[in-house]
Image (cartoon, coloured by chain):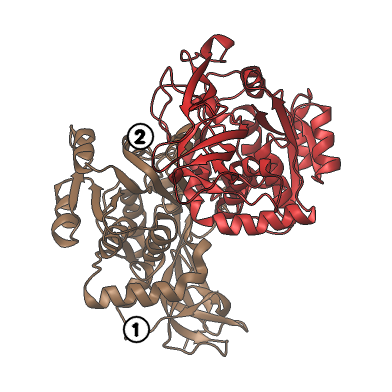
Chain colours: A brown, B red
């Protein structure tokens, strides 16, 4: 057996300005030792995740996460099989949740890994409904949104990995859920498959009027995960004591067409309506992981929460898939099987 | 004994635009029956409160409270002695907290009254440190501000009834407290009498630089009770996970010189810094009244929380005192002994 194994990976060739293009990425091939150094493991990537937040990491400048430097491997969550281990904690054949990003055969410290039980659910769900997007929806909605039966919950990007979970949890908690998505296929999905009470197409020319008509009792919770135009329409419809969780997943669409968190809220309306507006990212609620896995695992098993995956084959296809994601062209949790 | 008693009261003669003047008020004299109708009591006002929020009530337009109509009695909290009662719940001589506003001998429904025990503290404190301003400070700081030891708390209007309580509770909770007030007398008071760690004069030409220097570790809690210029200086100093309770007491300075809640916050900074910005008024936390009275009563008794009252004698003097309050000319909780 060779002493090394080929690891193919995609790095950021240069920082993008606005929407990334193929020129911002580069495929590299490196050799990794078959026997990893002490405390590390050699992995085979089964799936890695593509998420909008990755666009933010490509920018310099302050954010809640460290920026990626040019030449650095595109980061992100991954589900991997352990090929070789120099750690007492993992054995070959184990399936683990890792953060190794866009590579085929990464080496990783055992410390950053979490074992996945493949008998509980398809392992890919550890990157989606039972992973970061699902937990973002769960923690943001329950901790900040605090849904109560009969309240009106509005969710933008409602067919996405986070939004679709937010809406379904809202339904479980007894809310009237109004979802916003782009195009008829997605609106039909959230209404007919996911059971949202109302599904609105934000591309409709009379979208503003539709949103108002869909919320005759006002809006009690707006799960903010897009920024921009929808917020401006939602704001006047907010009820007293409305809660607005501001979700970090697509934090950094700034400069990318169709997004932008440039919107603002006046302190006067915060006060007069007694609004609660709160930003968060999923790691802020890391202590709730067990609660999340128990609840969401149960809902997925029972069929109360459904999810949809969009699996792209081949490492090279990660780049166009990622650009498509930023343009809103995917439908379901976007994964790459490299 | 006469069958009626003279009640002198001040009504709003006409809505003000901007800062009120004497012409916006009118003194009226009416006769009240010595024996009130069933379910009501006749009161003698010992103290009534002057608060900035009363300016807001004088405006038309939507807010969290009903607007006052021209010809209506100026509303507000009062501490009164029961002169005569047609209610089984109150007897002559009882001291009660009422909401009868700017009048000398009001009649009131027994339902809206709360008995005060004069043996616990001076009865005037029911309008101040043990009343709405104190409870505004307590509930807003503890529920939304969630102070932790070692954190930096910034309080504007720090010599006022709310701000002075916020800062002292912050100290009790282990925060480093930076207070902002206008002029040397007030800054000296909050630093030397109330024990704030730092006292800044917002009139100082280099106030912005002083504020930054006073918060070398950034700001974890900003108790927003003024709006406008201070917020704009505080915002860039906010730490990740900072909390901003937006207090309703002086909600409606809009149009009045020196105030204004016209300031805004960008959703992007809410997200990147994971800010929590939440508006409230004291009645939102009405269920915490017993906790408040127990804690604050104890702190006042032990001397851990101090308060200052500014008592104006004579009903007629309420008008100039109120205008002075809106101009920041009072020092301590402003009360009228009519």
Q: Residue furthest front?
A: B1
Q: Chain of mark 2?
A: A
Whole-percent x, y for residue B191 in the image: 83, 41
Q: Residue furthest top?
A: B23
Q: Nearer the viewer, residue B230 or A122?
A: B230
Q: Based on the displayed image, in which of its 4 quarters is residue B250 positioned?
A: top right
Instruction: Give the numbered dot on residue A232.
Output: 2
SS category of the residue bearing label 1: loop
Instruction: Give the numbered dot on residue B42.
Output: none
Apparent side of residue B186 relative to residue A111 in the rendered image (left or right) = right
Q: Based on the displayed image, in which of its 4 quarters is residue A108 positioned?
A: bottom right
Image quarter where the C terminus of chain A lies is bottom left
Determine the residue positioned at 52% across, 83% down: A34
Apparent side of residue A275 relative to residue A196 in the rendered image (left or right) = right
Determine the residue positioned at 18% across, 36% down: A204
Determine the residue positioned at 71% across, 37% down: B158
* Position of A173 relative to B37 (above/below): below
The residue wearing badge 1 is A118
SS category of the residue bearing label 2: helix
Would residue A265 be visible to someone looking at this image? Answer: yes
> Whole-Å distance between the Cαs marked 1 and 2?
43 Å
How many residues crowd around disc 1 within 10 Å: few (fewer than 14), some, or many (20 or more)? some
């Amino acid at each position: 057996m060779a002493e090394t194994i080929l690891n193919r990976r995609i790095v950021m060739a240069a920082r993008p300005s606005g929407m990334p293009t193929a020129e911002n990425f580069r495929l590299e091939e490196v050799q990794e030792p078959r026997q990893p150094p002490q405390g590390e493991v050699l992995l085979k990537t089964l799936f890695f995740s593509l998420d909008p937040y990755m666009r933010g990491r490509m920018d310099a400048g302050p954010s809640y996460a460290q920026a990626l430097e040019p030449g650095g491997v595109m980061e992100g969550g991954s589900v991997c099989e352990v090929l070789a281990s120099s750690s007492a904690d993992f054995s070959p054949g184990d399936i683990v949740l890792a953060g190794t990003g866009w590579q085929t055969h990464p080496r990783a410290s055992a410390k950053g890994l979490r074992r996945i039980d493949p008998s509980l659910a398809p392992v890919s769900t550890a990157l989606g409904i039972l992973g970061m997007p699902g937990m973002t929806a769960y923690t943001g909605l329950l901790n900040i949104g605090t849904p109560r039966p009969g309240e009106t919950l509005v969710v933008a990007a409602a067919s996405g990995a986070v939004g679709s979970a937010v809406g379904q949890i809202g339904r479980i908690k007894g809310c009237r859920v109004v979802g916003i998505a782009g195009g008829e296929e997605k609106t039909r999905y959230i209404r007919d498959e996911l059971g949202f009470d109302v599904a609105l197409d934000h591309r409709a020319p009379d979208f503003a009027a539709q949103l108002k008509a869909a919320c005759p009792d006002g809006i009690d919770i707006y799960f903010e995960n897009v920024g921009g135009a929808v917020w401006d329409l939602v704001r006047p419809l907010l009820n007293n004591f409305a809660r607005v969780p501001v979700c970090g997943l697509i934090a950094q669409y700034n400069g990318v067409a169709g997004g932008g968190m440039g919107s603002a809220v006046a302190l006067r309306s915060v006060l007069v309506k007694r609004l609660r507006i709160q930003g968060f990212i999923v790691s802020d609620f890391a202590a709730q992981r067990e609660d999340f896995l128990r609840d969401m695992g149960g809902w997925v098993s029972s069929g109360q929460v459904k999810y949809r995956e969009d699996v792209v084959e081949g490492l090279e296809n990660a780049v166009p898939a990622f650009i498509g994601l930023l343009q809103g062209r995917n439908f379901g949790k976007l994964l790459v099987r490299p």
